[in-house]
Structures are given as C-alpha cells and as structure tokens.
Amino acid sequence: ENGSAEPEPSLEVARDDEGRRHYFEGYIGACAQAIREGVKLRGYFAWSLMDNFEWQFGYQRRFGLCYVDFNTQVRTPKLSAEWYRSTILTNGDNIQLPNNDKEEHIE
C-alpha cells in the first residue's frame, strides 16, 4: 500500500493527476518485476480511494483516486482512478515493462 500526496486546490487541477498515475505505474511495475524474480507478492493497494484528512498534511494535500469536495461531499474520479481501473481490468496489460531491451506486459 502506498500513495502520492499532491497539492490539488481544485477539481480542475485534481482531475489531471498524471503525476499520481506515473507514481502508481512505477510501483506496480516494480511489483511485477519482483513477482518475476520470485517474490510471493499477493496484493497491492492504492492509498487512497478518496481524498481525506491526512495527519501530516491536513487538507492541504490529497492522496485520493477520487476528488472529494469537502463542502458538498461530491466525489469525482480523477484520471488516475480511470487508469487504475483499466490496470485492474486488464491485469496490468496497460503497463509496459522493460526486459532486456524488449518490452513486455505484466503477466
């Protein structure tokens, strides 16, 4: 389990969270590499599904795959949520991994 705390002051900024997507892609790719090397990794969890109060940052930074408007409680999936959904549905087939000068997908 891990996540990326980002300063996202508005929905417009939060929706395009390409940095978070790259962060997760790097970690999930590393998990795939570890599995190929024999690590018995059983799962991975993105922190967190929704923006929330964080002890270190309060409401200043957001971790969620879904943006939460704290005044209305309306939740809006960010681009990273859509990417993570696709990653789950394709078993990681949307992640390219380098392997000895050739590209391969997670198996």
Image (cartoon, rainbow, N blue to C red):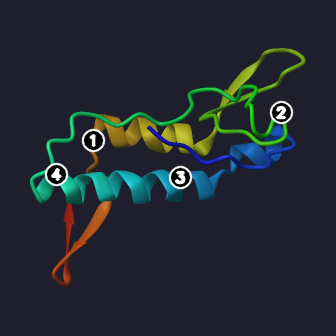
Q: Is mark 4 on a helix, strand or loop?
A: helix
Q: Which of marks 3 and 4 is nearer the N terminus?
A: 3
Q: What residue would you read off at disc 2?
A: 59
| Amino acid of disc 4 | Ile
Q: Is residue 59 above or below residue 99?
A: above
Residue under the image location 76 percent in, 26 percent down: 53
Q: What residue would you read off at disc 3?
A: 21
Q: What element carries label 3?
A: helix
**What numbered label is drawn on residue 90?**
1
> What is the C-alpha distance between the residues marked 4 and 2?
36 Å
Q: Is residue 43 above or below residue 6?
A: above
Q: Is residue 29 above or below residue 83?
A: below
> What is the C-alpha distance between the residues marked 3 and 1?
16 Å
Percent x, y of residue 23: 51, 56
> What is the C-alpha distance between the residues marked 2 and 3?
21 Å
Q: Which of marks 4 and 2 is nearer the N terminus?
A: 4
Q: Residue furthest front?
A: 56
Q: What element carries label 1?
A: loop
Q: Is mark 2 on a helix, strand or loop?
A: loop
Q: Which residue lies furthest to the right in this view?
A: 71
Q: Local crowd at mark 1 within 10 Å, few (<14), some, or many (≥20)?
A: few
Q: What residue would you read off at disc 4?
A: 35
Q: Is residue 66 left or right of residue 85?
A: right
